[in-house]
Image (cartoon, rainbow, N blue to C red):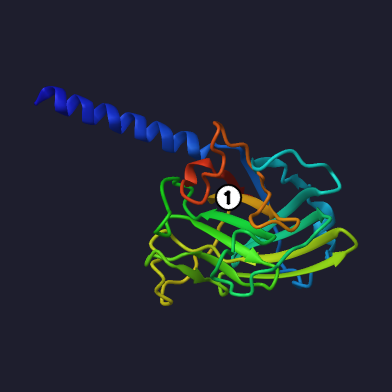
């Protein structure tokens, strides 16, 4: 009995250590903006010029790629209503071949937004302890619902993009929902506040004309051979700290 209690306590210590490490994982401060940008895929607001670019350059799936085939970076800001994203994606082929947004949504070119409202980490495949939003070129937003089926979350993320040559600029507004969200529309997004920490990552799925996506390129370093863990495990997300 004593050994059982000891082992349980030891496991508790390791679990706490994992959460603590997650809270400090690849931390990044995020600046406050008072006025929301006009979501039109054009970074005309002056405050976008004041924010630093952050890379989306970690190859999670696929072989090597060159700069002309893919290059990505983003800027991020916040206010009480949610997160605001500006992405610059260089991609020589933009593909959206699956018309049904709930079928093979991960194989078309899309932006993937990973959000863990309380930065707690942990599993989230069939729950909303965290979200893996696939934002398609047509604006549809897909994640797995609590019923284990693909579900549209178009009211969670609003996006617009503009393409100039091989470069596509995306602007997004992301509402941040709590981990208790269970697909009940009565559960509202949280009001963001200064010093709040949010688990977060971005990725871009790149398909130049294959049956499956050729690369998945993320914004955070993931250790180990299996780097495509974010859609299940929020422990690999980075950490945003909201500042003013």
User: Which residue sits at x=82%, y=68%?
Assistant: 162
For the question of whether residue 44 can be seen, the reply is no
Q: Is residue 167 left or right of residue 201?
A: right
Q: Is residue 220 above or below residue 104?
A: above
User: What count of labels does the image hold?
Assistant: 1
User: Which residue sits at x=48%, y=33%?
Assistant: 21
- Badge 1 crowding class, 10 Å Cα cut-off, few under 14, some 14 to 19, many 20 or more, is many
User: Helix, strand, or loop for circle 1?
Assistant: strand
**Outermost residue to the front:** 211
Depth check: 232 or 105 in front? Answer: 105
Residue 129 in the image: state x and y as whole percent: 42, 55
User: Which residue sits at x=39%, y=64%?
Assistant: 148
**Outermost residue to the top:** 3
**Outermost residue to the bottom:** 186
Residue 234 in the image: state x and y as whole percent: 48, 47
Depth check: 143 or 49 in front? Answer: 143
Q: Is residue 66 left or right of residue 221?
A: right
Q: Is residue 50 above or below residue 45?
A: above
Q: Which residue is mark 1?
A: 200
Depth check: 218 or 47 in front? Answer: 218
Residue 49 in the image: state x and y as whole percent: 85, 55
Residue 66 in the image: state x and y as whole percent: 82, 42
For the question of whether residue 15 can be seen, the reply is yes
Quarter-wise, where is residue 175 in the image?
bottom right
For the N terminus, the image quarter is top left
User: Which residue sits at x=55%, y=44%?
Assistant: 228
**Outermost residue to the right:** 165
């Amino acid at each position: 009995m004593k050994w059982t209690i000891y082992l349980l306590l030891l496991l508790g210590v390791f679990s706490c250590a994992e959460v603590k490490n997650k809270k400090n994982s690849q931390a990044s401060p995020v600046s406050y903006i008072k006025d929301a940008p006009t979501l039109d895929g054009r970074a005309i607001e002056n405050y976008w010029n004041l924010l630093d670019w952050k890379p989306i350059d970690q190859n999670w799936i696929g072989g090597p790629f060159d700069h002309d085939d893919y290059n990505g970076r983003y800027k991020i800001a916040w206010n009480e209503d949610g997160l605001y994203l500006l992405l610059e994606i260089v991609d020589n082929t933009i593909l959206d071949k699956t018309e049904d947004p709930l079928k093979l949504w991960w194989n078309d070119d899309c932006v993937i937004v990973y959000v863990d409202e309380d930065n707690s980490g942990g599993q989230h495949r069939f729950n909303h302890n965290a979200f893996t939003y696939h934002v398609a070129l047509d604006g549809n937003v897909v994640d797995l619902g609590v019923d284990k089926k693909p579900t549209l979350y178009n009211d969670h993320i609003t996006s617009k993009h503009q393409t100039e040559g091989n470069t596509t600029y995306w602007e997004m507004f992301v509402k941040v929902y709590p981990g208790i969200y269970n697909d009940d529309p009565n559960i509202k997004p949280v009001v963001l506040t200064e010093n709040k920490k949010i688990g977060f990552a971005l990725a871009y799925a790149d398909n130049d004309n294959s049956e499956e996506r050729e690369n998945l390129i993320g914004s955070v370093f993931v250790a180990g051979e299996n780097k495509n863990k974010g859609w299940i495990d929020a422990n690999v997300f980075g950490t945003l700290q909201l500042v003013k």
